[in-house]
Image (cartoon, rainbow, N blue to C red):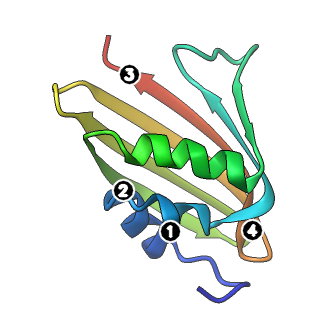
Amino acid sequence: MDRNLFSLSALSRAVETRDSAAMRDFYAENARICIIDRDHPPSRPQEIVGRSAIAAYFDDVCGRTMTHKVQNGLVNGERIAFTQACTYADGTRVFCSAMAELKGGKIASQTIVQAWDA
């Protein structure tokens, strides 16, 4: 990937094939991910800071038996947004909406909002 050119199709491919090594390469060294979901409300979001912590997060997520489908993605200058539909082997579904800021072709900060089946 060109250092200054972000590829939504390459990110989608990495997400959908559960390729955690490829996923970590999309993030800047000091990137930050903020996750808001049923366990981490807006007043106490989960914060993941730095590429090594982000790599560990994606190793965990990509190691789970589930499917991921990236939908409705767009890149607009230094911002990207996409939704993601996930399904665990037991049928539990998760919907994710992500918005990120790019710097130098890498994700510098990202906010993820997740909704889970009850």
> Mark 3 — residue?
116
89 vs 99, nearest the viewer: 89
Instruction: Identify residue type, mark 4.
Output: Glu
Q: How far apart are marks 3 and 2 (CA)?
A: 19 Å
Quadrant location of the C terminus?
top left
Q: Distance between the residues labelled 2 and 1?
A: 9 Å
Q: Which of marks 3 and 2 is nearer the N terminus?
A: 2
Sort mark 2 into few (<14), some (14-19) or many (20+) by Cα contacts within 10 Å: many
Question: Which structural element holds mark 2?
Answer: loop
Quadrant location of the N terminus?
bottom right
Q: Residue at x 42, y 65 (%)?
A: 14
Location of residue 64 in the rendering, given as x and y in whole percent from the top left corner: 33, 39
Q: In which quarter of the image is residue 28?
A: bottom right
- Which residue is most to the bottom? 2
Question: Which structural element holds mark 1?
Answer: helix
Q: Which mark is residue 22?
A: 1
Location of residue 55 in the rendering, given as x and y in whole percent from the top left corner: 60, 52
Q: Which residue is drawn at 43% across and 74% down?
A: 9
> Mark 4 — residue?
78
Q: Nearer the viewer, mark 3 or mark 2?
A: 2
> Mark 2 — residue?
18
Q: Distance between the residues labelled 3 and 1?
A: 25 Å
Question: Which structural element holds mark 3?
Answer: strand
Instruction: Identify residue type, mark 3.
Output: Trp
Contact flag, marks 3 and 2 (Cβ < 8 Å): no
Sort mark 4 into few (<14), some (14-19) or many (20+) by Cα contacts within 10 Å: some
Location of residue 25 in the rendering, given as x and y in whole percent from the top left corner: 61, 69
Left or right: 13 in relation to 34 = left
Left or right: 6 in relation to 103 = left
Q: Which of marks 1 and 4 is nearer the N terminus?
A: 1
